[in-house]
Amino acid sequence: MRCFLAIDLPDPVREHLVRVQSAVRAEVPKASYPKPENLHITLKFLGEADERQIARLVDSLGRVKIDGALRLTPSGLAFFPPRRDARVIVATMTGSEPLVAALHLAVEQRCRALGFASETRKYHPHVTFARSPRGVPHAVRQTLTESLASEWPGPEMSVTEFVLFESQLHPQGSRYIRLASFPVGRPPH
């Protein structure tokens, strides 16, 4: 099964991002857009995993401990790659950066110990809005950034868990199934 680890979004954040995504869609109509229920903050893409790997992963991730109140806020648009015609449009998420970094590092270490490939790029929490195979020219990026400036910051969210999802590919789009959830953000003792 094809799996990933992510932070799910509460309704107020999801609704805010869907509104912003609609404005992006108006400027970049030929991109592909995830369904509103599929918006999330990816912690780690795992790829294909069998049931044994998943069972070991669930056991290991259940021991991740992050102390403190982990909060994130949608804070603006970003485009990847940043210097050429962007193929990916995202909402950046800021707040509690040290705790998010600690969570990401703990997840990476446990996944690597179980044989999943390590991510080499620096982690930046974000929600992917759109993928544009043709790329988004700089002028359109500038227009979007300026026209949506009043949308930021969005509503703050408290992160209380992260989730192991299975991604099932269907002709009408991906469907994400929750396989397990793991609590985070315990108050310090």
Image: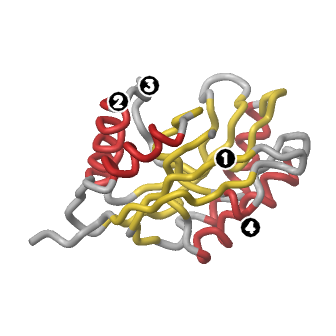
Q: Quadrant of residue 28?
A: top right
- For the residue carrying disc 3, how many other residues have a C-alpha within 10 Å: few (<14), some (14-19), or many (20+)? some
Distance in Å between CA atoms under marks 3 and 4: 35 Å
Q: Residues within 10 Å of mark 1 (few under 14, many from 20)?
A: some
Image disc number at residue 112: 2
**Residue 34 or 94: which is nearer the viewer?**
34
Q: Is residue 62 left or right of residue 90?
A: left
SS of the residue under disc 1: strand
| Residue under the point 47% across and 44% down | 54
Which of discs 2 and 4 lies nearer the camera? The answer is 2
Residue type, label 3? Ala
Residue 131 place in picture, x, y as percent? 75, 38
Q: Which residue is mark 3?
A: 117
- The answer for how far apart the CA atoms under marks 1 and 3 are is 18 Å
Q: Which mark is residue 167?
A: 1
Q: Are marks 1 and 2 in contact (CB under 8 Å)?
A: no
Circles 4, 1 touching at the beta carbon (< 8 Å): no
Q: Nearer the viewer, mark 3 or mark 4?
A: 3
Image quadrant containing the C terminus: bottom left
Q: Residues within 10 Å of mark 4 (few under 14, many from 20)?
A: few
Mark 2 lies on a secondary structure that is helix
Q: Which of marks 2 and 1 precedes in the sequence?
A: 2
Q: Which quadrant of the figure contains the N terminus? A: top right
Residues tagged 3 and 2 counted as in contact (Cβ below 8 A)? yes
Residue name at image x 68 percent, y 42 percent:
89
